[in-house]
Image: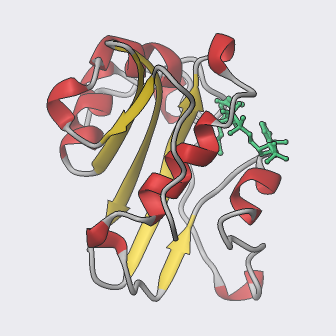
Amino acid sequence: MKPIEPPAGYSISCDPALLNLDTVHGFIANSYWAKGIPKTIVEKSIRHSIAWGIYFGAEQVGFARVISDKATFAYLCDVFIASEHRGKGLSKALVAAIKAHPDLQGLRRWMLVTVDAHGLYEQFDFKPVQNPERHMEIHQPGLYLEGQPPA
Ligand SMILES: CC(C)(COP(=O)(O)OP(=O)(O)OC[C@H]1O[C@@H](n2cnc3c(N)ncnc32)[C@H](O)[C@@H]1OP(=O)(O)O)[C@@H](O)C(=O)NCCC(=O)NCCS
C-alpha cells in the first residue's frame, strides 16, 4: 500500500512524543465507541500501541492507533479527524500511512469495527467479516459510564 501525501500544511507521524494526550482524550471520551473513557486508560492504550497523529502545523487534528503483534495480526481503532478538518482526505492519508508502516506488513489478519465508515476502509481492502459465526467477543460498551475504576 503506497502512502498518500496529506494536503499542504498537514503532516502525519507515529512519533509518540508529538501526540497531544488532551486532544486525543477529549475526542475519544466523547466518541460513540468509548464514551467516558478516563485519560489514564487512553494514555496506557497509546503506550501499548502504535499511534499516529495528523498535524496541521503543530496542532494535532487527527489520530488513530493499531494494536498488533507486528507479525500476524493488527486491530485498527480510535480513528478520528477533528470536525473542522474533515472532508479533505486526511483519514485516507492516515489509513494509507498505517497500512504502509514497515512493522505491519505481511499480516494474516487486520480487523476494525465501525458503525458507518465502511466506505473509508473499503478503499484500503477491508471487507465485511466473511464468517461472522466464527467470531466471538466480550464487549462492554458502557464500561466507562458505570463508574468503574481504571484497570
Ligand atoms: C470518519 C472520519 C475519520 C473520516 O475522516 P475525513 O478525513 O473527513 O475523511 P476523508 O476526507 O479522508 O474521506 C473519507 C472517504 O471515506 C468515505 N466515507 C465513508 N464513510 C464515511 C464516514 N462515516 N465518514 C466520513 N467519510 C466516510 C468518504 O465519502 C470519503 O470517500 P471519497 O474517497 O470518495 O472522498 C471522520 O469523519 C471522523 O473523525 N468521524 C468521527 C469519528 C469516527 O466516526 N471515526 C471512525 C470510527 S471507525
Image: 14 above or below 88: below
Q: Quadrant location of residue 74? A: bottom left
Is 119 left or right of 98, judged from the image as shown?
right
In x, y percent, where is residue 80?
Answer: 57, 32
Question: Which quarter shows the C terminus?
Answer: top left
Q: Nearer the viewer, residue 99 or 71?
A: 99
Split into quadrants, the picture shows ligand 1 in the one at top right
Identify the residue shown where x is 75% and y is 74%: 127
Image: 29 above or below 76: above
Q: Quadrant location of residue 106? A: bottom left
Image: 132 above or below 98: below
Is 127 left or right of 1, judged from the image as shown?
right
Identify the residue shown where x is 75% and y is 88%: 131
Q: Quadrant location of residue 133? A: bottom right
In x, y percent, where is residue 49?
Answer: 27, 51
Image: 95 above or below 143: below
Is 61 left or right of 68, judged from the image as shown?
right
Q: Nearer the viewer, residue 35 or 56?
A: 56
Number of marks in the rendered image: 0
Q: Residue furthest left?
A: 17
Identify the residue shown where x is 31% and y is 12%: 58
In x, y percent, where is residue 32?
Answer: 67, 30
Is 48 left or right of 58, judged from the image as shown?
left
Figure colour scheme: secondary structure
